[in-house]
Image: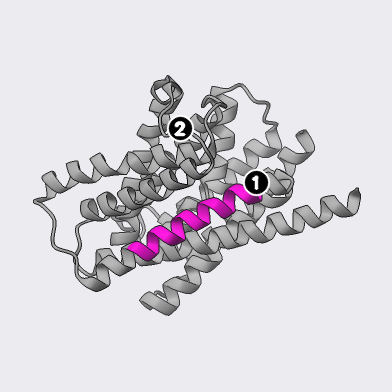
Amino acid sequence: MKGTAVSENLRGSLFMVLAMLGFAFEDMLLKRVAGSGMPVGEILVIFGGGGMLAFAALTRAQGQPLWHPAVVSPPLLAKAGFEVMGRLFYTLAIAYTALSNASAILQATPLVVVAGAALIFGERVGWRRWSAIVVGFIGVLIILRPGLEGFTPLSLLAVAGLIGFAGRDLATRAAPKVLSNFQLGVYGFAAMVPTGLALLVFSGGGVVPSALQAMQLVVAVVFGVAAYWALTVAMRMGDVSVVTPFRYTRLVFALILGVVVFGERPDAMTLVGSAVVVAAGIYTLLRSRRAG
């Protein structure tokens, strides 16, 4: 029995690493498309529509309905709003700032979720975890370096995306249990379409995608959907406390892709801040396991 649990944890951890690799490649491809001149609003429309169709197919393959009355429940509406916020601002962040910086800031999401769970749902969080949360936020400030020479206001886009994704995760906790992960995926990607259309109206319209841009967006959708599936498998297969820390491998992959594909050179403060955020997050997860 113990051997089976260890095996499932190992496989769950592997699926988590593969999920983070998929998300990192998704980010890289979206950044390349944005860098080639396609408006972010158009990227959101195409990427969101493609992801919605892919999850709709997976949902139907599971014999589940595409529509459920729970979609209009307050938690799901809140989730959709935060999903829009997270996707919009994080896509803008990876389009206009270094991939390594944006990804590093995003790693603070679990810390914000823990703090939100304590403040909103009344979950018990001891002083050690609160201390780790504060340390993690200090790590984000080290990356942002407000008031110093290396500070760029555009890096705040990643912070807004972080808040959106954390709010989405908190709203997901309160979402009706009758909805499957695939159904939630349909609604999450669908929310990006009207958001992208609104952004296009504001920014002056879209462009006709080139063959390369279209191919990169299709591959980004494939990576995104596959990563979401692997994430779902990981969370269901292994112990959450064992599998979840492997989320931070996304930062490692983002740093490598940033250097290799975009020629980024993360400076010492970015690396130090990233290490602080990751260490604080892992410590928080370990403390959560003990508290459980």
Q: Nearer the viewer, residue 113 or 57?
A: 57
Q: Position of 201 compared to 32: left or right?
A: left
Q: Position of residue 52 (x, y in %)?
A: 37, 46
Say whether residue 267 is left or right of residue 81. Answer: right
Number of callouts: 2
Examine the residues drawn in magenta and state their main secondary structure. Answer: helix
Q: Position of residue 259 (x, y in %)?
A: 44, 76
**Residue 245 visible here:** yes
Residue depicted at 56% across the width and 30% down the height:
173
Residue neighbourhood size for the residue with mark 2, other residues' Cα within 10 Å, grouped as few (<14), some (14–19), many (≥20): few
Q: Distance between the Cα atoms at labels 1 and 2?
A: 23 Å
- Compared with residue 93, is residue 285 higher up or lower down, i.e. above or below? above
Residue at point 56%, 43% (across, down) = 110
Q: Nearer the viewer, mark 1 or mark 2?
A: 2
Q: Is residue 133 magenta?
A: no
Q: Quadrant of the C terminus?
A: top right
Q: Quadrant of residue 67?
A: top left
Residue 149 visible in the picture: no
**Does dot 2 land on a helix, a strand or a loop?**
loop
Q: Which residue carries the number 2 mark?
A: 65
Disc 1 crowd rating (10 Å Cα; few below 14, some 14-19, many 20+) is some
Depth check, front residue: 227 or 289: 227
| Whole-percent x, y for residue 78 in the image | 40, 27
The magenta-colored residue range is: 218-234
Quadrant of the image occupied by residue 131:
top right
User: As displayed, is residue 74 above or below residue 114?
Assistant: above
The residue that mark 1 highlights is 235
Residue at the spot x=45%, y=32% of the render?
A: 65
Amino acid beneath label 1:
Met
Which callout, 1 or 2, points at the residue further toward the start of the chain? 2
